Structure formats: structure tokens, C-alpha cells
Image (cartoon, coloured by chain):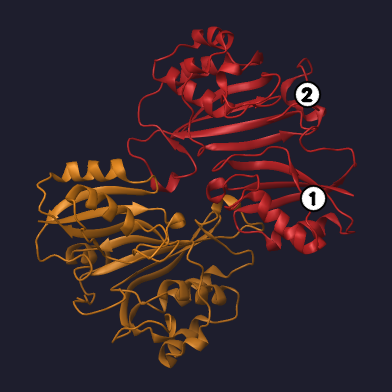
Chain colours: A orange, B red
């Protein structure tokens, strides 16, 4: 039986999602609980392997089990054993063919920046501090210029090892708020460090060091040296995971291109 | 020259204030910076040695230096070298006789509790979760009953090694807010774990397991077995430090008893 689990977590005290040789990870927390329940190792498969310090407002994983436990009981069993910084929201039984990673049609990330003159230790790990004036209008113009299907070779880590670096962004916008702004981006998939490179570039636009008009040329050049910065992991939240075509079409319109990614890596 | 430094910090990722054999501490962060600047070890003396996981909205320490650096430059030098979860607010030159611990006339703590049905991973480390109904009115009545000068032997860790366990509380109240309550307590000084024991007791009152009328008898009995619980460190904030009689009298009236504590320990 395949079980789908919807979770959220505060990333601050995790070395990321994926299990490591040493260090606390989200995968490790769940596999420890499942091992105790199954008396054997049970592997979990997430939608997204978030990096060290990255948070998840919504994340999914699936695993296979022979245990006959009702979804509500799974949820209770896991929440009772989990540490305070992870929460299970929902547990459902899914088709054996369903795969959290390959059946993910899109994801939204939110990156939070606060702009006070002095940094605030109580935002540490939760928002990134920028203490210079930024032109949010220009940043939003630049953000919008990434919407659509593009080769993002110039906007991801050079360590990204995937065949195609073409991704489709359905949404890419700067949303101002009382103490700074959020960058919200939804796409068919994301390359390694892509959101953090986009944020760092948009901040350069906000400082006037880049212009919104530079975006098409930079996408075309596919040269990461043109876009050398990466924003810190703190401030980055996986916010929404699209596991059905219906919800993606509902949020972004019936004329969008849907990408199925049975073979993509690093997504 | 004696330098007084006003700081705040997020306690989540510290093993407390005081330097340890191993583990990240607030004292360690400052002494590392001061050692680099002085080319020798410089010890810092805090008002309060907060425990692992306890936060400080306001905390002070002092140190002695032969370096002739202006206060603003000290502040800048320290903030540039500190990690994101500590901030220096103010640096001042003080009299050589001034001592952060012995000249502290009072402290305020705030303990934050949120009361949603499900815990929130993004409150992890910041607020304590309670998911049962609590009678905040009765809790506040009980809280008020601690105001005044009492022997708090029954409301502190049995490991507390001080001559006198008599302390004066100037304020002790439950303040309801949108998602729970804060317990705010101001006193001449606090015994080891005292605030966390008081909070745990007040929660018992909120559940109806204790009554506000029990307080005088429990203070009288001086028996910690009567008050066996300690609330978790997360949720506890050192909020204000009174270094002058004037501010304490201003906040709590001219008729309060001021305690000078040149000889007290664990404060």
C-alpha cells in the first residue's frame, strides 16, 4: 500500500531533507519512526529535497507499507513521535503507480526579505536581511520577465547535472509587505539553487546594478558568470506542491503548458 | 576602562549564555571577537546567565579593556563579526565600580504560550504549545498572588545553591493575546528555573488542578514536591534589565522595596 504524507517543517535546525552521513535531516526523522513501526528500514520519497536551512510550508513524501493502519492513525503516530519543528498535516492512501517526485507538476517557492536598518536576531533563519534601498517596481518587472518557458542554465548552480535546463515559470513576482518583500515563484520545476540565484539577481536589479531589460539577454547567454550571486538559504520556503493538473490549471489558467517529468533530475 | 554592552539574541541555537566545554554559547561568540581584538583572553560578565534555548530581548554584559575605541566603533566592530542571531544595541563606557550582575536591581521575563489545536512548526523554539483549554482569569489571579516578598524555595530548582531564597516580585501577570497568552514577571531577582516553575504551576491552575487560593500555602510549605513541573525553556525571554533605581521606581512606584544584591548567587 502506498501512503502519501503532507508535511511542513522549520528548516533552521535541519541539514536539509535528505539523509546524510551525519547531521539531523527531515528524512532521518521519518525513517526512524517508520523503522520502529515496521521493524525494518522503510525509505521515503519526497517531492523535493530541500537544502540545509530551507523551510517547507507544504511538502509531500510517499512510502510503501504492508501495515494496515488507517490514515488518521498514521498521522497521529507520526505527530506523536516527531520533534516540534516538523508537522504531519495529512495522510492519504494513493495508487501504487503514484510517485511524489515524478507526479509533481509544479511547485511554488516563497523567499522572504526584510529591510530594516538594523537586522533582527529574531528573524534569524526565517527571513533574509537587506539594509539598502531597493526599487521593488523594477524588481517586479524583472521578476515578470522570467515567466514562460526558458533555458535557465545561467540561473542555477553550475553543479546542476540534468539533461535539460528548460523550465516553465507560471508565476514570478515581487510582493511588497510592511517590512520588506516576498518573491513568489511557481514553476514546472526548479534547477539546483535556481530560486536563490533568481532572488540574488532581483536584488541586484533593486540596487540598480541590473535592469529588467537585461533578462532576455542573460537567459540567452546561459552564462552563470553573468549572474554570480546566490541568496542565502534562510528566507526560502517551499510553499505549495501541485500534484494534480486540475489545481495547476485552476491557479494559472487553462492555456498554460504542463510539463510531466518522468525523467528529470534535480527537481 | 569598563564597557557596558546591551544585546539581544535568539536562544534557539545556543547552549545558553555561559561558555561550555563544547557547544555554541553567547559568551563564546563575544569572547572570540574580543580575543581577536585584544590578542589576549577578555572575560565578559553578564547580568544573567540564560539557559539553553532561552532568548533575550534585552541583556547586558560588561568587560574591561585598555583599547581606546569609541562606543559606536565597538558596536560596529562587534555587529560586523557576530552571527545573525545576536545583535549589539548599545555600547557605553561605565564607571570602573559598575558590575552588571551586582548592580542589576531587577529583571523582567516574558514566557510565551500559544494555544492552537495543532502545534505549528514555525513557532518551534519561540513559543510553548498548549492544546488544552486554560482558565486565564484564574491563572492571572494565581500569578498576582506571587507579587511581593516571599521565600521561593518551593518554586525553584532544588539544585539552587544560594543562602537566601527570598525574592521580591514587582509584577506577575497573565496577558491574553490572539493565539494564547504571555506570562510577564518582574522581580528583584530569580532563582534557578523559577520562572519556568511558576509558568508550569500557573498552567496547572489554568487546567483547574490547582487554585489561586493555594498559592500562600505552597509558598509557606517551601516544598518543591508540591510544585513538581518545569515549563520548557523555549518560550522564555529575558525582556528587561533594570540597572538603575530610577527606572524601577518609575515602572513600579516609589513605595517598592529595592534589593541590592552584592552577595547573591544564581541571579
In which quarter of the view is residue B101 placed? top right
Element class at badge 1? strand
Residue A151 drawn above or below residue B132: below
Q: How many marks?
A: 2
Numbered badge on residue B249: 2
Chain name for mark 2:
B
- Seen as rendered, the residue at the extreme bottom is A221
The x and y percentages for residue B18 are 65, 44
- Residue at x 55%, y 77% (from the top left corner): A205
Q: Is residue A158 left or right of residue B90?
A: left
Residue B121 drawn above or below residue B136: below
Is the residue marked by circle 1 packed among few (<14), some (14-19), or many (20+) residues within 10 Å?
many
Residue A49 visible (yes or no): yes
Q: Give the residue at mark 1.
A: B91
The x and y percentages for residue B141 are 52, 14
Q: Is residue A30 left or right of residue A245?
A: right
Residue B76 visible (yes or no): no
Amino acid at each position: 500500500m502506498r501512503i502519501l504524507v503532507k508535511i511542513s517543517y522549520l528548516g533552521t535546525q535541519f541539514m536539509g531533507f535528505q539523509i546524510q552521513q551525519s547531521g539531523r535531516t527531515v528524512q532521518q526523522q521519518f525513517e526512524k519512526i517508520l523503522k520502529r513501526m515496521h521493524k525494518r528500514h522503510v525509505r521515503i520519497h519526497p517531492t523535493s529535497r530541500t537544502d540545509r536551512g530551507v523551510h517547507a510550508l507544504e511538502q509531500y513524501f510517499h512510502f510503501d507499507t504492508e501495515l494496515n493502519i488507517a490514515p488518521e492513525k498514521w498521522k497521529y503516530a507520526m505527530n506523536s513521535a516527531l520533534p516540534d519543528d516538523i508537522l504531519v498535516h495529512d495522510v492519504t492512501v494513493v495508487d501504487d503507480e503514484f510517485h511524489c517526485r515524478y507526479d509533481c507538476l509544479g511547485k511554488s517557492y516563497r523567499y522572504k526579505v526584510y529591510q530594516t536598518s538594523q537586522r533582527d536576531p529574531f528573524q534569524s533563519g526565517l527571513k533574509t536581511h537587506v539594509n539598502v534601498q531597493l526599487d521593488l517596481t523594477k524588481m517586479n518587472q524583472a521578476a515578470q520577465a522570467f515567466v514562460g518557458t526558458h533555458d535557465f542554465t545561467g540561473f542555477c548552480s553550475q553543479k546542476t547535472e540534468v539533461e535539460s535546463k528548460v523550465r516553465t515559470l507560471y508565476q514570478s513576482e515581487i510582493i511588497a509587505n510592511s517590512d520588506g518583500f516576498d518573491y513568489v515563484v511557481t514553476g514546472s520545476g526548479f534547477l539546483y539553487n535556481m530560486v536563490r540565484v533568481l532572488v540574488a539577481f532581483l536584488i541586484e536589479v533593486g540596487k540598480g546594478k541590473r535592469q529588467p531589460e537585461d533578462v532576455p539577454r542573460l537567459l540567452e547567454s546561459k552564462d552563470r558568470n553573468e549572474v554570480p550571486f546566490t541568496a542565502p538559504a534562510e528566507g526560502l520556503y517551499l510553499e505549495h506542491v501541485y500534484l494534480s493538473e486540475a489545481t495547476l490549471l485552476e491557479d494559472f489558467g487553462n492555456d498554460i503548458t504542463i510539463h510531466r517529468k518522468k525523467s528529470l533530475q534535480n527537481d
